[in-house]
Image (tube, rainbow, N blue to C red):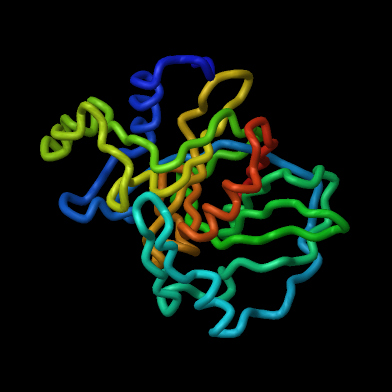
Amino acid sequence: MDMDAGKAAAGARDAAALPELRLGSLSRRSFLMGSALGLGALSLAGCADGLSLAEAEKLYGPLPNEKFPIPATDISKVNPKYFRRTVKYETKEAPGTIIVDPGNYYVYRIEDEGTATRYGANVGRAGFLWHGDAYVGRKGEWATWTPPKEMIQRQPEVAKYAGGMPGGLENPLGARTLYLYQDGKYTLYTIYASSDPESIGSGITSGCVGLLSQDMIDLYDRTPVKTKVVVLPA
């Protein structure tokens, strides 16, 4: 489907990648999504020293000025190796390119001079590890989520969202969403904001890629539409 298609159709497609939700909390752990993307000639050469506790608390602190104020991330539930940091990363991809490494639960934004910003991520579970090239076709802040018909049949309790679940802290798409396209068509796959710190470093989705809300906002703000996205094989 083309980028200029109506919002209702887009919402239905967004939901197609979300087969299960837990009633009540709408936990991201139950939010099974998908991701799309590709292969690149690159190698991780090393990483910067780990963050101090004070640095991590600042990095993942509350965001009270958001449309829906975001609380601080409970960093005690995140392995420190998944905290955002600048690392050495050799690649032929241009600065700004996003590279997803599902085998290691990382997302990289390529910077200048052989470095990248690295974010911890949740990724697709076994059997849902797509790889390939894509690009950011559109972006969304506090996007509306609409469950597909198949999900409503399995979980009648979500039928109340058939007309769309407005953006908010309980919305599965979170604070920010990057929608991935190929050849002018939406792939159904996204990079989204997760409020579930325990999901980082896990394969829990049907392919989509989740970053902590603070990390996703950082990536979103630095990613224009048409940015290339590469998902490596797991």
Front-lying residue, 153 or 147? 147
Q: Position of residue 166 (x, y in %)?
A: 28, 38
Left or right: 32 in relation to 164: right
Q: x, y (%) of residue 24?
A: 16, 53
Q: Is residue 126 visible?
A: no
- 129 vs 136, nearest the viewer: 136
Q: Say how many tags the image has.
A: 0
Give the side of residue 193 with respect to residue 36, left or right.
left
Measuring 64% from the left and 43% from the top, which residue is drawn there?
Answer: 223
Which residue is the extreme one toward the front?
65
Which residue is at a point 48% across and 42% down the rendered structure image?
Answer: 177
Identity of the residue drawn at 57% across and 47% down:
220
Residue 81, compared with residue 66, is above or below; it is below
**Left or right, 132 with reference to 21:** right
Residue 217, position as x, y percentages in the image: 53, 53
Judge from the rendering whether residue 173 lies leftward or rightward of residue 105; answer left or right.
left
Q: Residue 153, how many percent across, how many down?
A: 16, 30
Q: Residue at x 39, y 31 (%)?
A: 14
In the rendered image of this protein, does residue 72 appear above or below residue 11? below
- Residue 115 visible in the shown view: yes
Q: Residue furthest right?
A: 113
Residue lying at the far left in this picture: please name it: 157
Seen as rendered, the residue at the extreme bottom is: 53
Q: Nearer the viewer, residue 55 or 135?
A: 55
